[in-house]
Image (spheres, rainbow, N blue to C red):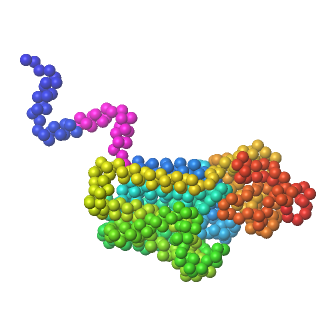
Amino acid sequence: MAHTQADQQADRQAGEQPGERAARATRDAGRDRRRRSPAARVAARLRRTRRVVWLSLLVSVSAIAAQWVLLTPPLYFDPYYVWLAAGSWPDIPLTRWPFNEVPHQVTRLGLVLPARLVQEVLGPGQAGYFVVAALGGCAFFTGTYLVVRSLFGDVAGIASAAVLLVHPFFTMTNPFGHEITWSTGVVLPDMPGAGLFALGMAGLVVAGRRTGRAQTRLLLAAGVCLGASFLVREFLAFLFLAIPVYLALLRIPWRRNFTVGAPMLAILAANLIHNQIVWGTPLAGLVSAATHGGESRDHVTRELALRSFPRAMHDWHALGAVFTVALVLTIVGWAVTRDRRLALVLVWFCTLAVPLTLFSGVLDPTDIKLRAWLQRYWFAVLPALLAGGFGSLILMSRMLPSGLLSRLRLRSRAVRRVVVPVVAVALGGAYAVAAVSAVPDLPRDKAWHELRGYLTEHREITLICADRRLAQTLTFYTRDTWGEPVWRGEIRDFPHYLPKVPANAREGPMLYTRWRGMESQIASGWRPADHGWTLRWRSSDGTLEIWNPPPATRLRGPG
């Protein structure tokens, strides 16, 4: 009887050895992959992508979304000088104004050079500023997720990132509303520096579970992140002192300290060479940081400096207690469980807390090097505190006796799978509601956007006077989003702390705001309406106003 082609193929397959059948199956699978459409291949690759990648992307997208919701306008003083230095690099004369006022800010290459790169690509406008701030936010929130995940899993990692995203320390950032600190959406070194350090610590933790070349690659990557964090925030170098302890707690061989240190030393060498070329001294950044400080305008005593951490957490907002509670939980959790991961977290915290406290006035109240009573100085240990808090809860919950679980009717795995998530969601929801409702207003940059439109339509205005804070932010809104000028008049600024508005501020319209947050009013509370000025324009939310000077007083003393 004649055989069909399919029968002949089946006969050949029946006579194959197992190894031959496996090889043929592999070849067939390869041909099938080549025959699949590009869309199918992309879909297959996406299915194989690890969950940690997707969750990291989720946290990064959430960070950018949060920044967009807040949309704090580009701010004045330190962020403005950093942005100005980035546009001027490598011509940043540290002895000339304004760079001589903040040499410690403009010598931070980890912030200045990325800002310069973004300006080259997107221009010097608001869009570029937003991107640089967003990169810092992504590094911080994603670094928090990754380091907490590496210690205690995805749930703890996502919960930690979520706690930070909606916390008032990272939402009340707009001085034209009611701010308590500058963080999300602001080009400052605190968040990117803390984020890079957290990424480095995540690399160390994961390296502790690897061997051979995989461990080497992770340790090198961790060293790059740790070294880069120093280029952004110098005092994070205090945390480097405990690297041998971190490795010991993670049971990584002592000789691996050299593997971590090699990229850090390479980054330091590159920094020193750059400083020598640009500023004529390799220690320009370190000298600027070391000489920064002096007697604080705030009242400082040794006793107050000693309480810098609780002051930073509690004096600004009640929800700062979240981090104090996390620290207490970490200490209790370590005392009960003696878990090495909690010991790592405590070493991380103490290694930064001790020098921050000492240099905030304990050593010398008249020479303040680090203002540790400000929250943003503690951003680098917040991921550690949240890791310790959530980790302690996880570890201690596993120590509950089975009899107690039975009495609580939680012995059934199915019941636990329902009750535990419900309790977690309820607590998280309550915290989120409290954190979001704590923000009294959300002005975003609405008023400034309207001002840009007004100036575009009224180019007959050739001069605007403003206090220096408003004037520096205004420079972003006399240009479009990409940095192209839309108004080419003169901006004349004056220091807000002057006892009277200067005479030359009466030569043109004045941009004015009634500061609602921590900023002081101009000229000890001076108001244009009280001195005969007339309103020319006001934003729809009442945040910004333009006033015309009174003609009768233009040739007399200050308004």
Residue 410 screen position, x and y as percent: 31, 54
Q: Name the dominant secondary structure of the magenta segment.
A: helix
Residue located at (48% from left, 67% from top): 324
Residue 498 screen position, x and y as percent: 77, 68
Residue 157 visible to an observer of this rendering: yes
Residue located at (81% from left, 53% from top): 547
In the image, 443 versus 465, the foreground residue is: 443
Q: Which residues are magenta?
A: 27-53
In the image, 231 versus 547, the foreground residue is: 547
Residue furthest front as drawn:
407
Residue furthest left as drawn:
1
Q: Quadrant of residue 220?
A: bottom left
Residue furthest top as drawn:
1
Residue located at (38% from left, 51% from top): 421
Task: Give yes or no for residue 30 being in the magenta stretch.
Answer: yes
Task: Give yes or no for residue 131 being in the magenta stretch.
Answer: no
Relative to 508, 218 lies left or right:
left
Residue 528 screen position, x and y as percent: 81, 58
Image quarter (top left, top right, bottom left or bottom right) of the N terminus: top left
Residue 125, above or below 352: above
In the image, 457 versus 537, the foreground residue is: 537
Residue 311, above or below 514: below
Relative to 56, 292 lies left or right:
right
Residue 213 screen position, x and y as percent: 30, 60
Residue 542, above or below 179: above
Image quarter (top left, top right, bottom left or bottom right) of the C terminus: bottom right
Residue located at (51% from left, 67% from top): 378
